[in-house]
Image (cartoon, rainbow, N blue to C red):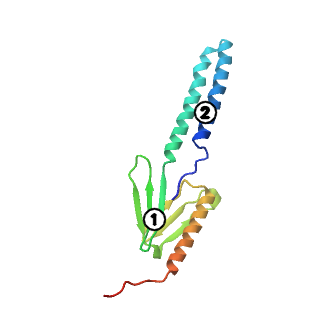
Amino acid sequence: MLHPHRSLGRHGFRVLMSVVILVNLLIAGIFAANGAWPVVPFCGLDVVILWLAFRVNNRAAQLYERVRLTDTDLTVQRVARNKPERRWSLQPNWLRVTLDGPPRHGGQVTLSSHGQSVTVGAFLTPDERADFAKALRGALALWRRAPCHPEPVP
């Protein structure tokens, strides 16, 4: 399962918004006491904009990708809020895992097999993408070394 990184949880968000609101109330009170009352609505506006930015970020963080390697195929399932679920099935025998570009400069992990390509983990950090590509290559190497178990003939 690949999830976007979220560095601020619910509790942290509440604490941050409480501090921002208190600071803005203090600033608005100072300006209002000095007769600059037109500044007061703008102190509330920046709180609303900050709240909206976090709301958009949290909705985007509901995206996830599931990469699953089975005996017969590798499936990639991408689920995002208010978008139809996307699913790709790739043949692991000929699957190539490539990490484009230098890892520090936002390379992409691309899975390619039989002319079909899927980019996964675009929301991961460069180090996480490199770790994911390495882990998937290792899993594919183990999958390819596993002995074939033909079905018994009746």
Q: Is residue 80 above or below residue 35?
A: below
Tag shown at residue 40: none
Determine whether label 2 and label 1 are within 8 Å by CB: no
- Image position, residue 36 (x, y; %): 64, 14
Amino acid at dot 1: Ser
Amino acid at dot 2: Met
Q: Farthest residue in the top direction?
A: 35
- Image position, residue 61 (x, y; %): 52, 47
- CA neighbours of label 2 inside 10 A, class few (<14), some (14 to 19), many (20+): some
Residue lying at 63% horizontally and 57% vertically, measured from the top left: 105
Residue lying at 43% horizontally and 72% vertically, measured from the top left: 91
Q: Is residue 19 left or right of residue 61?
A: right
- CA neighbours of label 1 inside 10 A, class few (<14), some (14 to 19), many (20+): some
Residue lying at 39% horizontally and 54% vertically, measured from the top left: 85
Tag shown at residue 17: 2
Q: Is residue 81 above or below residue 118?
A: above
The number of discs equals 2
- In the figure, residue 76 lies in which quadrant? bottom left
Mark with earlier residue (2, 1): 2
In the rendered image, which quarter contains the C terminus?
bottom left
Q: Is residue 149 above or below residue 91?
A: below
Circle 1 SS class:
strand
Q: What separation in Å lies between label 2 and label 1 (alpha carbons)?
A: 42 Å
- Image position, residue 62 (x, y; %): 49, 48
Residue lying at 48% horizontally and 63% vertically, measured from the top left: 67
Q: Farthest residue in the bottom direction?
A: 153
Circle 2 SS class:
helix
Tag shown at residue 117: 1
Q: Nearer the viewer, mark 2 or mark 1?
A: 2
- Image position, residue 31 (x, y; %): 67, 17
